[in-house]
Image (spheres, coloured by chain):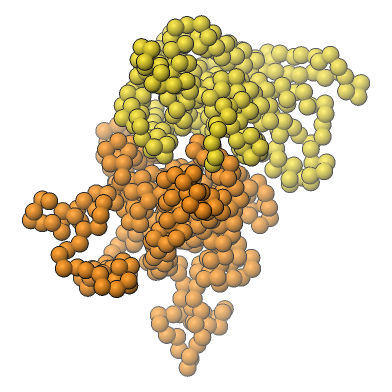
Amino acid sequence: MAVLRPAGDFDRTYEQDMAVLRQRWQYIVLFLFLLALFTLPVYATDSAVSLVNRIGIFIIAVQGLNILTGYTGQISLGQAAFMTVGGYTSALLMSELGWNFFLALPAAALVAGIVGLIFGLPSLRVKGFYLVMATLGAQFIIPWITRNMFKDVLNGAQGISVPVPIIKLPVIANQCFLGTQYDSDLAACVFRFATPSQFIYITLVMLIITTVVSHNISRSRLGRAFISIRDNDLAAELLGINLFTYKLRAFFLAAVYAGISGSLLAHNLRHINSETVTLVDSVFFLGMLVAGGLGTSVGPIFGATLVTLLEEFATVITPVVISILPDVAAGATAALRPLVFGLALMLFLIFEPRGLAHRWILIKAAWRLRPFSH
Amino acid sequence: MNWQLLPQFAITGLLNGGPIALIALGIVLIFKSSEIFNFAQGQMLLIGTMATWWFASPEGMGLPLPLAILAALGVSILLGLAIERFTLRPMTGQPLLSIILMTLALSQFLQGLTILIFGTVQRNFPVIFEVTNPYKITLPFQYNGNPIIVILKQNLVWSFIIAMVCVLVLWVFFQYTNTGLAMRATAEDHETAQSVGIRINRVFGISWAIAGIIANIGGILIATASGLDLSLPVVVLAAFPAVLLGGLESIPGAVVGGLVIGLAQGLVGLPNNDFFLGPEMAQAVRNSAEIVPYIILLVVLLFRPDGLFGQKRIERI
């Protein structure tokens, strides 16, 4: 769909043509939205903050999957496994080697990316169902490794506890600034990202970075190459796109995003084991992507938000279901989460396969054309 | 390496491969006729087996076992037909990703539905085969002067035999009946099949119904051996690699794939192989039954991307 613009909105320079935000009111709306997010701990309850935190972390994972599945067309059921890699890596770098979180996070992303490259290798030879199976292999092999190998470091099935990310500032004139607390062990001023209302700042900053990066990837040479591979891989190859290296780049990027997301999740939960994110989460990420809209920048944001809210809804209606069906009391939560998700995804696939992003475009177009219908 | 136990583990594994092969066959069947890879097979199996339990147990209907199994097969057929009609027929002509996601969504939906109907409690599945008297077979060769004796549980042997009989019946069905031939024609080419008067929607319905029956029988065979609870679909996760190992379109491939996976899962359980691996690695290898199918799959995909018996696709990837 062509982008509809209000009358009189012309581009005079290349910069204007490339701008994501082209009008002053868009900057204002974005600023207000971000302001509302960043001040969330001030006015929202703890559970709401931790919900937003979780949504943010999932959005990052789905954005990675969007690069791989939405743009490049390679279906992956391994996103949760790469999150596990990211989570373990940054936790171990901090606790075993004493790295700072803000170094451990990119390192975790890089390690997850390299693991993603390894499991992306079969994409050279297979696609479709076969590739799904190869990535499903990652989803089994990686958690198995964390459970059964290197037990002295990874602690087997129990998993490991994850340190709190901290920012250290020097003590200036015997005082600590910027909301930090003096820590006598470290002899420095320290800000600890321990609770969700503190951790959400890391999540939001990372989310802004990943959103900007993934949107810009999608409209650069790299993203256009990805899209051409998705639409017709033979034609893409004839256009001079090296399928193998570009598919591997997509796998790498997807796994890097998963690594960031997994690292954030681990440090948010303060504990990680092989059950933290599982195959079911990989399925959920694919569902989020389709519900939001494949191959769009806003899709992951809409999808992750919608599905996480649906899960929340399933938790809320659990007492009602128990009152109607008292027999299932113990399993009601376990039942409703997959039930609601499965039903929602099936309805989306049948009635709105282009996802919420398409609906969003329609709404925007209708708003701009108001009061006329065409 | 304890060579004395090798035949025991190999044969047990191979026999365990029987039900896996049967389940893999159910997946191949649907793929052959409609090009849909059914990720919900595990949950179809779960619902069918739960229904069998409900019809048979005193907590439910309390029917005699043969009647209960027949009733459950009826439920599975209806479930298969309903899945085909209401979730997959609207998806005709949609891209691969949508169809994969549809069966994945279906698996989640059915999982939730099963818990909602039957709860999370572990059920005592009725005992079908005698438990106490395992078969003892003395192999006709010796190791270090000791005769090699293989002890096999009765349900293991009979599950394998029943699974193989089902495979044989299906093979006869495809080879000699009109419906079976119509299904093979549909698998070959939808339009050609339509042009000779085959109603392909009916064929899709039949293949889902048969897949439901197969899933139900496979589930019963597994539940008699290892009990019935919500972890039953996990077994199917070993059948997915079996399908691809043999090749997506190949019925003999599914059987061979299932047996190979069973054999490999049996062999890694072989004790006392820490001779050259060290105790920790040996323990890890013994726990590796769940990932062995996928490791085999990855290796096979690297060297033979179409599986062992799959159709060669002439295309660049």
**Residue at image coords 60%, 35%:** B305
Horizontally, residue B239 falls left or right of residue A198, namely: right
Residue A3 picture location, percent across and down: 25, 57
Residue A262 picture location, percent across and down: 49, 57
**Which one is in front, A299 or A17?**
A17
Residue A265 picture location, percent across and down: 47, 58
Instruction: In the picture, one chain is orange; tell me its letter.
Output: A
**Residue at image coords 82%, 19%:** B148
**Which one is in front, B260 or B98?**
B98
Residue A72, can we see it? no
Question: What colour denotes chain B?
Answer: yellow
Which residue is outermost to the bottom? A173
Instruction: Relative to A222, say whether A335 is above or below.
Output: above
Horizontally, residue A109 falls left or right of residue B59, namely: right
Which residue is outermost to the right? B145
Q: How many marks?
A: 0
**Residue at image coords 58%, 27%:** B310
Quadrant in the rendering for residue B274: top right
Residue B176 picture location, percent across and down: 51, 6
Which residue is outermost to the left? A371
Quadrant in the rendering for residue A133: top right
Residue B139, can we see it? yes
